[in-house]
Amino acid sequence: MPYSSSAVERAVTELCKLPGVGKKSAQRMVFFLLKQSPQTVKDISTALSELVYKVRFCSICFNVTEEDICDICRSEKRDRSAICVVEEANDIWALERMGDYRGLYHVLGGVLSPLDGIGPEDLRIKELLRRLDSVSEVIVATNPSTEGEATALYLAKLIKPLNIKMTRIARGIPVGADLEFADDLTLSRALEGRAEL
């Protein structure tokens, strides 16, 4: 549908570049913003601009930060003998939300995906290997996808010979789910990761 405003059309086009945002969602966002006060729209615009100019990746773990080293890597309260390896920085936020893990992190920046042309040299694997001197456990927390599993196996091949304990986060049935609706792979992983009562 042609717009009577090139500014509206451009805003819809730009919002469509966000993951999971199609044309209809982008249109809803634009028309929502048009109903807001100019100050609200300006505040949103400023916050998005600050992502480009203020936020960077931690020089140690590649988490998002506004400093050279993130709060987690700087903290004296973290267990430096464990590193949890995740795909992306937003995975750290998910793990930190539960408040149980007190070790460090390492963000790979993706997973191995030969079909997409992503190999080991495209991930931050070399940087991870350089951090393992005083580490006794590496916890692999990649997603339970084919690519996540391949990445976990590749890391295990590199790290196990260093006599460092390698663990993988458990996978299985989510709390509140019914067994009858779980797929075969999820049920199989849940049985493999069973714990003693």
Image (cartoon, rainbow, N blue to C red):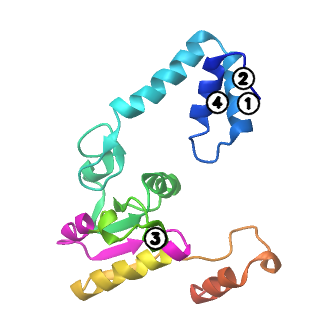
CB under 8 Å between discs 3 and 4? no
Q: Distance between the residues labelled 2 and 4?
A: 10 Å
Q: Earlier in the sequence, mark 4 or mark 1?
A: 4
Q: In this view, does 56 lie above or below 190?
A: above
Residue with the mark numbered 4? 12
Viewer-nearest residue: 184 or 69:
184
Classify residue 120 by image quadrant.
bottom left
**Res. 31 mark:** 2
- Badge 2 amino acid: Phe
Residue with the mark numbered 3? 113
Residue visible at 44% across and 56% down in the picture: 88
- Badge 1 amino acid: Arg
Q: Provide the secondary structure element on which disc 2 rests.
A: helix
Q: Distance between the residues labelled 3 and 4?
A: 31 Å
Q: Provide the secondary structure element on which disc 1 rests.
A: helix
Q: State the quadrant of the C terminus.
A: bottom right
Q: Provide the secondary structure element on which disc 4 rests.
A: helix
Please check the rendered image and state whether residue 128 is part of the magenta-colored stretch, yes or no: yes
Q: Count residues near mark 1 (Cα–Cα under 10 Å), then give few for <14, some for 14-19, many for 20+.
A: few
CB under 8 Å between discs 2 and 1? yes
Residue with the mark numbered 1? 28
Percent across and percent down for residue 10 are: 59, 25
Q: Can you tell which of label 2 and label 4 is closer to the viewer?
A: 4
Q: Provide the secondary structure element on which disc 3 rests.
A: loop
Q: Is residue 1 left or right of residue 132?
A: right
Q: Give the range drawn in magenta.
A: 126-147
Residue visible at 24% across and 54% down in the picture: 60
Q: Which of marks 2 and 4 is nearer the N terminus?
A: 4
Percent across and percent down for residue 192 are: 58, 89
Classify residue 131 by image quadrant.
bottom left
